[in-house]
Each structure stands twice: as structure tokens, then as C-alpha cells.
């Protein structure tokens, strides 16, 4: 039994998230429908990250098993002809036996884009959260330092999703950088961690914006983290500003 991995980019605007759901258009559902048409049999896939409705991806990884040889280039062309608008398969690779997109991953990188100021974005409107006030990046960076390392992130996830489940995660990077795209000023929050809880990145971003707009002191974020209570942290940032940027695997995963 061979294992293949698809690298998939998608605009999440029209989809009800990544994970398949009965009666809803999802990224995973569209990919599995396209695989069934291309290969002639039902295929069950595993995604590296379960992005919410409206969240985008640049390099989501989707794995599946197949009991015959496949021409990777031909399959890629077929899938790009069969998938819904807003989904692009950027690569198909043969993986070692035992590989699975989710449990084999070492780290995931998300990027969240903000557009601060009184002028709304035009080109970035579908991919950035417009924050109508200015942002104090120094305060935001100071607050972000408390999130680095391994912590219990109960305060930064959907409360119901954390019940009876482990909530410790490790963040390696929380970078905040100004960036101009198509002439529009934006701020990108880059977050890299071993794994993430439900809506964790979006709650972190919403909390960082609270400090960047002066509604909360930078020290407050550390207190919210220690509280282990969702009500202690800030609001959940809108989904459309978030992109699953890349997934990292051990070198031995790549054939």
C-alpha cells in the first residue's frame, strides 16, 4: 500500500472549513470527490490541519493510501481540473509507508494579516482583518513574548473543544512584521507551533490586537494565559485574515 501526499492551496471564503461535513461544501470533501473521479474509487484523506470556515491555506498537506502505482504529474493535472474553484493542488508526492499528514507533522505555521488605519483595504479585503485604529507594534511584540514556549492554552481556544482533552502546546515563533502588498500596508503575525487548538491562532490574534490598540496592557496577555479560562482572553479574530502557511515534517518523510 503506497502513501501519497497532496500539497493544496485554497481560498477558504466559500468553504465550510477543511474537514468533510455532511451537506456542506468543504475542502476535504471536494478533494475526495475529485480523487474518486480521477481514481475510480472512494478515497479517504487525512489533512495536516483542520482549518475553520473562511480560513485559507497556502500549503495544506493531505495524505491518502493507494494500492497501485500513480503518475503524480498526471494526478495533479486531473485534480486541478476536477476540484472546485478556489482549490489548487500544487504538488503530489510519494511518501514513506506509515506517513500520515496530521500525526507525522512536526510543526505548523500560520500567518494572520491585519490592515490597520481608517482606510479599508481593497485588494486585501478577503485576506486581512481591517482594524480601524492604529496598532502599537511594540506593545504587541511585548505581549507576544509571554506566549513563547510550552503552555496550557485553554484560555485561547473554543471552550467546548478543550473539555477532557490535553491543551498544552508549544509555540516556537510569534513574529509581527509590517508588510506592503499591492500597495496596501498590512501587519503580518507569523505563528509557528507544534500543534494548535480549535481557533487558537485567531484568539491569540484577537488578544494581541487588544494590546496593540491600548485596550489592554501587554502584561495582561500573560495573566490571561495563566487563567486557563476562555473568558480571560480577548475576542476571536475573523477567519478571513488567517492562512495555514506551511507544515513541517522530518526529513525522512520525503522520498
Image (spheres, helix red, strand yellow):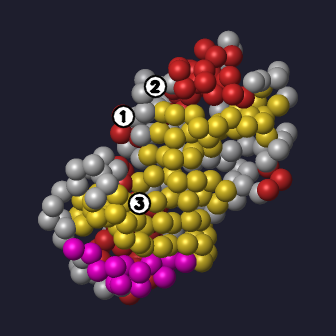
> At 48% from the left edge and 33% from the top edge, which residue is drawn?
87
> Residue 93 colored magenta?
no
Compared to residue 186, the image places residue 253 above or below, namely above
Q: Which mark is residue 84?
A: 2
Q: Mark 1 sits on what residue?
A: 14
Q: Quadrant of the C terminus?
A: top right
**Residues in magenta, as a range:** 134-148
Compared to residue 69, the image places residue 239 above or below, namely below
Question: Mark 2 vs mark 3: which is more N-terminal?
Answer: 2
At mark 2, the secondary structure is loop
> Which label sits in the foreground, 2 or 1?
2
> At 51% from the left edge and 52% from the top edge, which residue is drawn?
244
Residue nearest the observer in this picture, 24 or 164: 24
> At 46% from the left edge and 60% from the top edge, which residue is drawn?
111
Q: Mark 3 sits on what residue?
A: 112
At mark 1, the secondary structure is helix
Is residue 60 in sight in this rendering? yes
The reply to whether the C-beta atoms of the residues labelled 2 and 1 are less than 8 Å apart is yes
Residue 159: x percent and y percent?
44, 59
Residue nearest the observer in this picture, 53 or 231: 53
The answer to whether 92 appears left or right of 167 in the picture is right
Residue 174: x percent and y percent?
50, 72
The reply to whether the C-beta atoms of the residues labelled 1 and 3 are less than 8 Å apart is no
Amino acid at each position: 500500500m503506497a502513501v501519497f501526499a497532496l500539497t493544496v492551496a485554497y481560498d477558504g471564503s466559500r468553504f465550510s472549513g477543511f474537514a468533510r461535513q455532511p451537506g456542506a461544501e468543504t475542502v476535504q470533501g471536494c478533494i475526495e470527490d475529485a480523487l474518486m473521479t480521477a481514481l475510480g474509487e472512494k478515497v479517504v484523506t487525512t489533512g495536516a490541519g483542520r482549518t475553520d470556515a473562511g480560513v485559507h491555506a497556502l500549503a495544506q498537506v493531505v495524505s491518502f493510501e493507494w494500492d497501485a502505482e500513480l503518475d503524480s504529474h498526471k494526478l495533479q493535472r486531473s485534480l486541478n481540473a476536477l476540484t472546485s474553484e478556489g482549490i489548487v493542488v500544487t504538488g503530489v508526492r510519494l511518501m514513506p509507508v506509515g506517513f500520515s499528514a496530521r500525526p507525522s507533522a512536526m510543526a505548523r505555521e500560520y500567518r494572520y494579516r491585519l490592515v490597520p488605519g481608517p482606510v479599508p483595504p481593497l485588494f486585501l479585503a478577503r485576506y486581512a482583518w481591517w482594524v480601524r485604529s492604529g496598532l502599537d507594534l511594540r506593545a504587541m511584540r511585548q505581549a507576544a513574548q509571554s506566549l513563547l514556549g510550552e503552555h496550557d492554552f485553554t484560555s485561547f481556544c473554543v471552550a467546548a473543544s478543550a473539555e477532557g482533552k490535553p491543551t498544552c502546546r508549544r509555540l516556537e515563533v510569534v513574529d509581527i512584521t509590517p508588510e506592503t502588498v499591492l500597495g496596501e500596508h498590512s501587519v503580518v503575525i507569523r505563528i509557528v507551533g507544534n500543534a494548535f487548538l480549535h481557533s487558537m491562532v485567531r484568539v491569540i490574534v484577537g488578544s494581541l490586537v487588544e494590546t496593540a490598540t491600548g485596550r489592554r496592557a501587554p502584561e495582561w496577555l500573560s495573566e490571561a494565559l495563566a487563567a486557563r479560562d476562555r473568558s480571560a482572553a480577548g475576542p476571536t479574530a475573523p477567519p478571513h485574515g488567517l492562512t495555514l502557511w506551511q507544515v513541517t515534517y522530518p526529513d525522512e518523510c520525503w522520498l
